[in-house]
Image (cartoon, grey):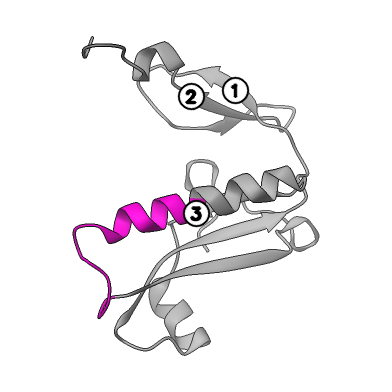
Amino acid sequence: LRWAAYIHPEGIPPSDKRPSNYIVVLVNMHRAKKEFFAYDVGASVENILLVSWSYGIGGCWIESIDRKSLKEILKVPSHIRIDSVIALGYRDETPKIERFKNSVRYWKDKKGVLHVPKRELKDILHFDYYKG
C-alpha cells in the first residue's frame, strides 16, 4: 500500500496502528463488462464500508497500491485485475472535515490532527436542473 501520499511520510501508520484486515478487490476481466465493472466495484466497496461502519469498524478505500507486488504475493492470475484494497480496523483518530477550496489535498496540523477537505452537499446536489 502507498499510505496517504499527500502527507508522506507522516501518513504512514506505525505497525501497531495499521488496519487489522484488508480486502483486495478483484475483477475477473474475462467476465466483466469493461464499460460497467467500475460501477460494480464502486457499489460493492461502498456497501462494504457502510456495513463496516454499522459495526463500529473504520475503513478506507485505497487505490494507491503496488498491484504488481500484490499479484505476485497473492498469486493472482493474469486475467484478474487488482482494482483496489479496502483497509479495515478500529479508528485511531477522527479527522476534521474542512470546507473544500479547490483541492482535495488533506493535511495534518501541528497537533497531528488530520484535516480533510469535503465539498458541501449544495455544491454537488442539484434539484430539477444543473446549477453549475
Per the rendering, the mark at residue 97 is 1
Residue 85 vertical position relative to residue 53 in the rendered view, above or below: below
Q: Earlier in the sequence, mark 2 or mark 3?
A: 3
Per the rendering, the mark at residue 2 is none
Residue that sits furthest to the front in the current view: 128
Residue contact at pointers 2 and 1, CB within 8 angstroms: yes
| Closest to the observer, 59 or 8 | 59
Q: To which residue does mark 3 refer? A: 45
Residue at left offset 23%, top offset 9%: 131
Q: Secondary structure at mark 2?
A: strand
Position of residue 120 measured from the top left corner of the image (x, y, whole percent): 46, 16
Position of residue 39 measured from the top left corner of the image (x, y, whole percent): 33, 52
Q: Which residue type does callout 2 highlight?
A: Lys
Q: Secondary structure at mark 1?
A: strand
Question: From which residue to which does the magenta span run?
Answer: 29-45
Q: Earlier in the sequence, mark 1 or mark 3?
A: 3
Q: Quadrant of the C terminus?
A: top left
Q: To which residue does mark 2 refer? A: 118
Q: Is residue 99 left or right of residue 77?
A: right
Asked if the stretch drawn in magenta spans residue 50, the answer is no
